Amino acid sequence: MARAFTAGRLVLATHNPGKVREIAELLAPFKVDVVSAGELNLPEPEETETTFIGNAKLKAIAAAKASGLPALSDDSGLSVTALNGAPGIYSARWAGPSKDFNLAMTRVEKELGGNPNRTAKFVCALALCWPDGHCETFEGEVHGTLSFPQRGQKGFGYDPIFMAKGQTITFAEMEPAAKHAMSHRVNAFRQLVAACFKTNQ
Ligand code: ITT
């Protein structure tokens, strides 16, 4: 059985403001006081693992040990079928040191070239880790297609080029609540809540 989250305070082990916003919104119905790694001035660990789950654990363990509080991390990315799953765990790194996602999305389009296969998925691994090193991990996905040029101003990262299956607008054109109804992050978050947050509702 998964370890229950019973503390009143949780560190969001991410330095990505888009993730902080989305995860804080998802946690809002629960009685949890949320503080981000940025607010605590925690260092950004190097992502040395080869899987989303591995990197999520590494980030949450680092934040939990540094803060003495349970920490929730998110390792996520875009996986493009015709690019053999790239950029995948390298999704943030494709944006370069200046975190320029125009650059990253242009690279995806360029590498696809004339390939007609535009299917892709977003993957999100969540890790909830405690200062003693214990972790609970969850993975969610949302399948869809890529669409160029970019459309929409909402969301973050690769949202302007991703259309979930059955949708005609990109994630960046959707209201946050609509993205929350179907996203990879929500999918993983629902599993986390079912396993660890039962007593907090
Ligand atoms: P942290 O490690 O501090 O959490 P990061 O941005 O480096 O921040 P990742 O290593 O997990 O995070 O990189 C994932 C990238 O994938 C992220 O920078 C986004 O560009 C992209 N991504 C993840 N979820 C996304 C979403 O819901 N919409 C659009 N892009 C997303």
Image (cartoon, rainbow, N blue to C red):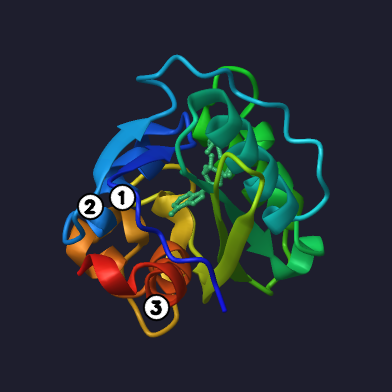
Q: Distance between the residues labelled 3 and 1?
A: 18 Å
Question: Which residue is labeled 2 in the image?
Answer: 25
Q: In the image, residue 179 lies at what x, y percent? A: 30, 65
Q: Position of residue 11 (x, y in %)?
A: 41, 37
Tell whether 97 sits left or right of 87. Answer: left
Label 2: element kind: helix
The residue under the point 16% across, 61% down is 29
> Residue 139 got which mark?
none
Is residue 174 toward the left or the right of residue 156 in the image?
left
**What is the three-letter code of the residue carrying label 2?**
Glu
Residue visible at 42% across and 52% down in the picture: 159
Q: Toward which corner of the image does residue 28 lie, by quadrant?
A: bottom left
Q: Quadrant of the image for the C terminus?
A: bottom left
Distance CA(mark 2)–CA(mark 1): 5 Å
Q: Few, some or many C-alpha atoms within 10 Å of disc 1 (few <14, some 14-19, many ≥20)?
A: some
Q: Mark 1 points at which residue?
A: 22
Are circles 2 and 1 on residues that touch, CB within 8 Å? Answer: yes
Which label was assigned to residue 194?
Answer: 3
Q: Residue at x 45, y 14 (%)?
A: 41
Mark 1: is the Cβ under 8 angstroms from ligand 1?
yes
One can see residue 178 in this view: yes
Quadrant of the frame with the N terminus? bottom right
